[in-house]
Image (spheres, grey):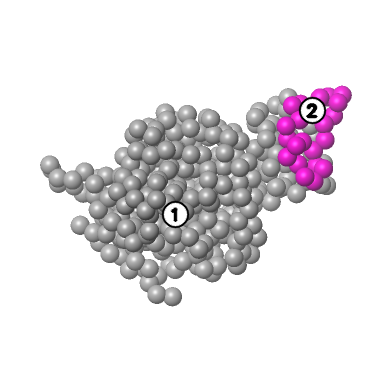
Amino acid sequence: MHKAHVYFTNFRTKAFGDGLPTKLKKMILKAGIGNIELQGRFVAIKLHFGELGNISYLRPNYARAVADVIKDLGGKPFLTDCNTMYPGKRKNALEHLECAWENGFTPLTVGCPILIGDGLKGTDDIAVPVTGGEYVQEAKIGRAIMDADVFVSLTHFKGHEMTGFGGAIKNIGMGCGSRAGKTEQHSSGLANIDEDLCTGCKACLKECANDALHFNPETKKTTVDHDNCVGCGRCLGACNFDAISFENDDAYELLNRRMAEYTKAVVDGRPQFHISLIVDVSPNCDCHGENDVPILPNIGMFASFDPLALDQACVDACLKAKPLPGSQLADNLSNPDFTDHHDHFTNSTPESEWRSCLEHAQKIGLGTREYELIVVK
């Protein structure tokens, strides 16, 4: 496979010159986004709006820059993300949109509509075949994302407590999965119901196709028959009271491989373009309701038609950078009893694992890890 082109520009600007959003526009045009036929086509821009309380997510200004370029090229962009599997401020479309608005993402600020990809309760998904999938045969992807004619990812490249880093593949694979899709990637486990939180509303019963949920008329609670439960996660989206949960009990390597396969389901056979910004590199995911001191300095903006090459280029750039003083990474390295793994992501969170994701992504044909870095000034 030939080398993919990955375009890069740093965060430096000149006094009285162009600002960073304009610099981002120039970079993605140079990278070839205009080569995609966009006239009159719906364009999904997938990004993370940030959990409420977290302030390390990408600023809306960057999303506006991408949306403006797409509109200038005749496209019809919308920002999108799918609901979370965990209780929080983004588990249904109403709260998710409110969270996005509070974090600065509104149609006025970003210049385009905002849609939650898997609908009101996270159950509006579509089964998408995974060509060459070893762990996932059909990925459960938010319907609005698959309905779009063109797919663009806009990623905040950062650390992650499970997958080592959160890059384009995580933004796409995990982010585009519906609540059931996220459950499938995170766990091979079965549903559990907290009777203290269960209200006996029976909404989950309508979603179970395997006779695994039973309502007890005496306790007025729903219980799970684990002999029948297949772990599909459909009940998760039906419960408005956070009574249903799945343990995140799968090995991180398996999580990474499923995530790569979900990404392939989203991008296979459709026009696509990918952007990653290495900025405010928090040690943990933007799904957290807080963020810690960045572990690495701001490096720059990257773009490519290949999400795997993009992730590899971002990883390489991060591994060459020096840890920031006072960060989780620096604190670990200053501990005399700490074992240096010579890897910033592993050193920041030693229990995490990231290599299996890129290795499996290449194996299933998602892209290539070989790239040529083209610097845009």
- The mark nearer the N terminus, 1 or 2, is 1
Q: Is residue 259 visible?
A: yes
* Residue on which disc 2 sits: 221
Residue at image coords 76%, 26%: 200
Residue at image coords 53%, 56%: 266
Q: Residue most toward the front?
A: 40
- Give the spatial CA distance, label 1 vs label 2: 44 Å
* Residue on which disc 1 sits: 150
Judging depth in this view, the residue of 345 and 168 nearest the camera is 168
Give the label, 1 or 2, closer to the camera: 1
Residue 136 location, x and y as percent?
Answer: 64, 59
Above or below residue 331? Residue 137 is: below
Residue range highlighted in magenta: 200-221
Q: Residue most toward the right?
A: 218
Other-residue count near label 2 (Cα within 10 Å), few / some / many at <14 / 14–19 / ≥20: some
Q: Residue most toward the bottom?
A: 1
Q: Is residue 215 magenta?
A: yes
Judging depth in this view, the residue of 258 and 38 nearest the camera is 38
Residue 27 location, x and y as percent?
Answer: 27, 55
- Quadrant (top left, top right, bottom left, bottom right) of the C terminus: bottom left
Judging depth in this view, the residue of 27 and 67 nearest the camera is 67
Residue at image coords 85%, 29%: 216
Q: Amino acid at mark 1?
A: Val
Residue 179 location, x and y as percent?
Answer: 61, 42
